[in-house]
Image (cartoon, grey):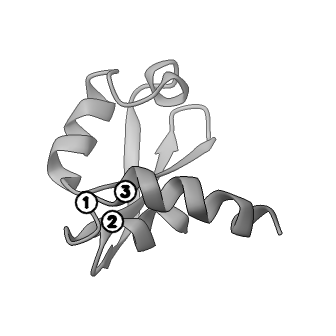
Amino acid sequence: MMAEALKKPLAKYLKNTHMKKGYMYILQCCDGSYYTGSTIDLELRLLQHQKGEGSKHTAKRLPVKFLYCEQYDNIADAFLL
């Protein structure tokens, strides 16, 4: 039910990027916690995380280790997972 409630606002937000390939990725932080994100530019996003610019969670837990990614036909699919 919660996922359905998020689909409409998310679809509106992502309408201009729905044709771009997307990536879902998982990082492990230095404290053992995990971070899951999505992006259309995986290389840039990983660099941002390593520089402390990726998210508040990872910025406080550097360095981060790249664990996994999946590629999707569009960013909306990657974002929802």
Amino acid tagged 1: Thr
Amino acid tagged 2: Ile
Q: Nearer the viewer, residue 30 or 12?
A: 12
Q: Position of residue 73 (x, y in %)?
A: 27, 81
Cβ–Cβ under 8 Å for marks 2 and 3: yes
Mark pair 2, 3: CA separation: 8 Å
Q: Position of residue 54 (x, y in %)?
A: 36, 31
Labels 2 and 1: the sequence-earlier one? 1
Mark pair 2, 1: CA separation: 7 Å
Q: Secondary structure at mark 3?
A: helix
Q: Is residue 4 left or right of residue 39?
A: right
Q: Residues within 10 Å of mark 3 (few under 14, many from 20)?
A: some
Amino acid tagged 3: Leu
Identify residue for label 3. Answer: 14
Quarter of the image with the N terminus in it = bottom right
Cβ–Cβ under 8 Å for marks 2 and 1: yes
Q: Is residue 25 left or right of residue 74?
A: right
Q: Nearer the viewer, residue 48 or 2?
A: 2
Say which quarter of the image contains residue 48. top left
Labels 2 and 3: the sequence-earlier one? 3
Q: Secondary structure at mark 2?
A: helix
Say which quarter of the image contains residue 31. top right
Identify residue for label 2. Answer: 75
Q: Is residue 31 visible?
A: yes
Identify residue for label 1. Answer: 17
Q: Residues within 10 Å of mark 1 (few under 14, many from 20)?
A: some
Number of marks in picture: 3
- In this rendering, is residue 12 above or below 73? above
Q: Position of residue 22 (x, y in %)?
A: 29, 67
Residue, far right = 1
Q: What residue lies at 56% left-to-right and 53% top-to-bottom?
A: 9
Q: Is residue 38 visible?
A: no
